[in-house]
Image (cartoon, rainbow, N blue to C red):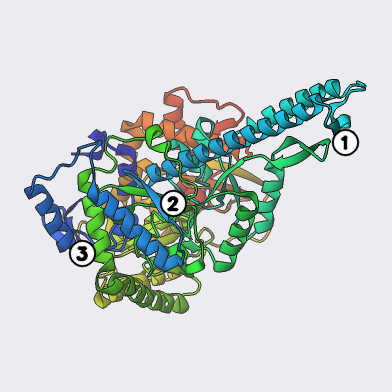
Amino acid sequence: MNRSQEQADRFFGQLMSTVGLDVEYRAAEGDELALVTADGGEVPVLDLIGGFGSLILGHHHPEVVAHVRAFLDQRRPVYAQFARNDDAQRVTELLNTVLRREFGFEDDGYAAVFGNSGAEGVEIALKHAELDRVFRIGALGEQLAGNLAAAGAAVASGDAVLSPEARALAGTRADGEAGAFAALTAVTAEHNAAQLAKPPVFFALEGGFHGKLVGSLGMTHNPLFRGPFQALGPTARFFPVDDPAALRALVDAERGSVLDVVVADGVVDVHERPAPVFAGLFLEPIQGEAGIRPITAEQARALQEVCREIDCPIIVDEIQSGAGRTGTFFASAQVGLRGDYYVLSKSLGGGIAKTSITLVRTSRYRKEFEALHSSTFAKDGFSTSVALKVLELLEADDGRAYRLAAERGAKLVDALERVRKDFPDVIADVRGNGLLLGVEFHDQSSGASALISGKSAAGQLGFVIAGYLLTAHRLRLMPTGSSPNTLRVQPSIYVTDAHVDRLETGLRVLCEVLGAQDALHLVHPVVAGGQAAPRADVRRLAPRPRPTDPAERTVSLVAAVSSAEALRLFDPSLADLDDQALEDYLTLLAPARALPPMPPVRCGSVDVVVFPFFASRHDLGADVAGVVGDLAAVLHGARTAGLTAISLDRDLGAVAGAVGLTAFPGLALDVVDADLVAVLTGTAAL
């Protein structure tokens, strides 16, 4: 089926097709996938994404598969709600055993609440933390009421009088103690009601990612994900993990207090007590979508110190980092970060089942939550059975899986560091722990290649790199969500030395291409259809010359890249690709037509800031609605960036004029009798 006819994630699929990632996989085993080729055949692909952390045991681990088959053959119940589930109990017991071993505590441990996904596990933690806060508010309210009643009785019996401070707070000149106490009661009641009605305050780290459901999204930092839905639910107060002073400042700004009227030694006084405002602090021990950034032991200690002082539970999101991926079951154990909650998911499903487990410290657990939160599919017989099998495999042979994760991770880091040291101008950093690693590439937005620099400026470099590695080297990697220049490396514990060598080889070639700014090698595999590249060597592209003398004026121009000739002038590194390949590439770029503006190009005495707009001749005539819609988005972006005037080239002006787009609010719009070829060759009359 053509992507334009699909209805499931159609637009995202079209975007992935622009970089060669819109592929189909037919089979999977271990760390390899079978990619379906254009002729219906198969080629093996090394999968280094690992289901975004869901495949610590790889695809279709034989023991997990055998367990699943036996489960189904035995016709064991999957959905038998409100019945015993011994596997769920055993999973909880095993997790508590692991927790005690890795954190060294001897208390009652943790209760478990099962869910269906990591984001749902975060929602469970969010809801339970608020329920716990509500109960703490209730308990505090009862204490306040009891103390007030005792003080009132003492005043009524003549056994106590108000202190000068209490009488001043009451704000009354009444001579009688009873009248003054009544005024004091009214003042404190009004204050306390307002303080106890405050909404909960959650904290979370800048860069943190905890899911995209309503509650979990509020704990996720990236405003691109969170912004459109911010009004729907609670939003955390975000702070940088390396700045505990910022957390303390947020705490001071959000503190609440209640007034406790107490009697002692015949005197009624008012004591200020903290109100239960702080509901929880969410964090990942290794921030995944932020670019694979581990927190340090020092940072963990500082956060725990603040949270102890304000009785704020710590909610540790181990959805991606947990289940042994870093060499211990809990990544947080390595930095001494003991949470009040842990959220687990992903690899607990063994690559087959969907599940999550939210662990709640017994001292905070509220049994009432079991009646207030439920799910038809959570804690089902199948997923809990698989989770138990996964735990048994991870714990087998005295935790051999954890040792493998650490050893294989070290092997990968050595290879990645070798590449970084050989290409320091291309790779900025290698970081992470175990089999949760990130490779950060330097920003390429000032490079000589207009295509590479434009894709980098648009935040698409990571996907371009991922597409190249897949199409040219059969390596499957993806960028992280909030750090688009960072590739995640998350294979299983069974990744081999040969796999590591393949990755190192592919990255070395990629670094040569990026270092030379030779975009031909990034584009050709996407449009080649298996054909050999027109040249195998990597050639360094010289930067486009820029005049040093000042221009008479500067104009901004949205110009169509609509032909092979224009594409070659736009990026000379593509010159050796034939016309058909370049025309195919232009067609492929339809879902992502626009790039940020290029550096100024001198045309006569005028500097032209070109806004590249990829649209083939066919699309300019046959997809007028799509072209105009994308063009309007470019104009909107230009206006938002502060431009007050912009021009369209001849081709885009004709398309816009055909549908009456001759003006744009807040932006002076005109059409020039020139095209991109004329501008880039310096022959346009502007």
Q: In terms of secondary structure, where does tag 1 sit?
A: helix
* First-in-chain label (3 vs 2): 3
Name the residue carrying label 1. Answer: 165
Q: What residue type is labelled 3?
A: Gly
Counting labels gives: 3
Name the residue carrying label 2. Answer: 481
Q: Is residue 213 visible?
A: yes
Q: Residue at x 41, y 70 (%)?
A: 511
Nearer the observer, 430 or 127: 127
Q: Mark on residue 601? A: none
Q: In this view, does 569 lie above or below 117?
A: below
Are the residues at dot 1 and dot 3 in contact (C-beta closer than 8 Å)? no
Q: In terms of secondary structure, where does tag 2 sit?
A: loop
Q: Is residue 467 visible?
A: no
Q: Which residue lies furthest to the left in this view?
A: 73
Pinpoint residue 365: horizontal percent, then vertical percent: 46, 45
Q: In terms of secondary structure, where does tag 3 sit?
A: loop
Q: Which amino acid does label 1 sit on?
A: Glu
Name the residue carrying label 3. Answer: 30
Nearer the observer, 409 or 373: 373
Q: Residue 684 vs residue 536: left or right? A: right
Q: Residue at x 58, y 58 (%)?
A: 304
Q: Classify residue 506 by image quadrant.
A: bottom left
Q: Residue 391 vs residue 281: left or right? A: left
Q: Which of marks 2 and 1 is in front?
A: 1
In the picture, which quadrant includes the C terminus? top right
Q: Residue 393 vs residue 238: left or right? A: left
Q: What residue type is labelled 2?
A: Gly
Q: Which residue is drawn at 69% across and 39% down?
A: 256
Within-10-Å neighbours for mark 1: few <14, some 14–19, many 20+ = few
Q: Which of marks 1 and 3 is in front?
A: 1
